[in-house]
Amino acid sequence: MPRLTCPMQRQPLEPLLERLERADLRRRRRTIERLAAPGSRAELIVAGRRLVDFSSNDYLGLAAHPEPAAAMAECAARCGAGTGASHLISGHGAEHAALEEELAAYTGRERALLFSTGYMANLSVLGALADRGETVLLDRLSHASLIDGALLSGARLRRFAHADVAAAEHCLGVGPEPVTVLATDGVFSMDGDVAPLTALARLAQARNVWFVVDDAHGLGVVGPTGRGAVEMHGLSADAVPVLVGTLGKAFGSFGAFVAGSAALIELLVQKARPYVYTTALPQPIAAATRAALRVAQREPWRRERALALTARFRAAAASAGVPLAESSTPIQPIRCGGARAALEAQRALVEAGFWVVAIRAPTVPAGQERLRVTLSAAHHENQVDALVEALARIWAQVRPEACA
Ligand SMILES: *Cc1c(COP(=O)(O)O)cnc(C)c1O
């Protein structure tokens, strides 16, 4: 009988966890009760406390909206909860097909392909477009799923300094293995700033490499009609041939998509392992997303409100002396001088009635720990003002030297 485990090679796990704890890097899940009742405004119950949520990506206030929830329930009664198989076997249904057409129309692309998660969408795109012997070039602050997609593709991964077009251009010209894909977040998930898409698109076109924009946090929110960072820069489908979007953020539902040419989408259907070898997303989720997309388009006041509350937050924070980063999107990071200071600020905010989460390494580089405040159309002006008051108090009293 072969030995199943070799005791010499097994490491005890507890010391690893203890090391995380000592470094203030241990993460904790909280069981959260989200209040969806009419009249509740971005409120949660955490460990029996009612808190205002300034941590979610529900920028348009659609996660608890009754229309997507009703569409989900109706579809579940009609189609069932599960799909039973992958898309290429028997899991692909009418709700998926309709949502894909609506997403293609929404983004102005030939076709769109639905994925269960944005994480899988990015693994798929980079796996399909990059290969061994090639290089994938990413902004240093790109989302983990782009990094993992590049690693899984077998290509070499290079990262350029954040939002630095000259650095990207330099990387395109060096190295033994040619760059075939240049990818970036549209709106950076932990910083809230918008990538220099016009210059990067020009660079990608000039060097004939695929340009991939993951606009998980821009779609639905920024741009003249909410079509995201690509629309904000006035870029065509030619300039950005591969657009990744997620549906669990501004659209308040779950899932993700890739939009692009018919050939790109067909290649993904054929080749993308995270698409081919996984069970199709439940149809009720696609139905909920379709409803959310309708609400988002019918009610542009939602993104206008999210952006207006963002401006209100920034103005109040600036006059209260709370340090802000350069971000005009609803993602408003407040840098803290280390993991412990960030956790202390988070605890103090809970005491004041707010749920804001300390973001630590490896989600952000060590030394750049922060509170990530996000604003939503669901917030009330008074809640934003009260958050700024609490932040100002915490900054003045708790750790004046820790956060800069
Ligand atoms: C959230 C996020 C993803 C992952 O999307 P999920 O649908 O949550 O898996 C991908 N890219 C970026 C930039 C994100 O912020």
Image (tube, rainbow, N blue to C red):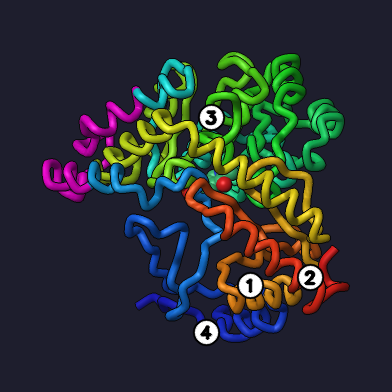
Does the residue at mark 2 contact the one at mark 1 (Cβ under 8 Å)? no
Q: Specify the quadrant of the image occupied by residue 198.
A: top right
Amino acid type at image mark 1:
Leu
Magenta stretch bounds: 73-101
Secondary structure at numbered mark 3: loop
Give the Cα separation between the discs numbered 3 and 1.
31 Å
In the picture of the structure, the residue carrying the numbered disc 2 is: 395
Which callout, 1 or 4, points at the residue further toward the start of the chain?
Answer: 4
Give the Cα separation between the discs numbered 2 and 1.
11 Å
Image quadrant holding the N terminus, namely bottom left
Q: Is residue 86 magenta?
A: yes
Give the Cα separation between the discs numbered 4 and 2.
50 Å
Amino acid type at image mark 2:
Trp
Secondary structure at numbered mark 4: loop
Q: Specify the quadrant of the image occupied by residue 351.
A: bottom right
Give left or right: position of 192 versus 29. right
In the picture of the structure, the residue carrying the numbered disc 1 is: 349
Give left or right: position of 386 versus 71. right
Give the Cα separation between the discs numbered 1 and 4.
46 Å
Secondary structure at numbered mark 1: helix
Q: Which mark is residue 7?
A: 4
Q: Position of residue 110 (x, y in %)?
A: 43, 15
Which callout, 3 or 1, points at the residue further toward the start of the chain?
Answer: 3
In the picture of the structure, the residue carrying the numbered disc 3 is: 226
Amino acid type at image mark 4:
Pro
Which callout, 4 or 3, points at the residue further toward the start of the chain?
Answer: 4
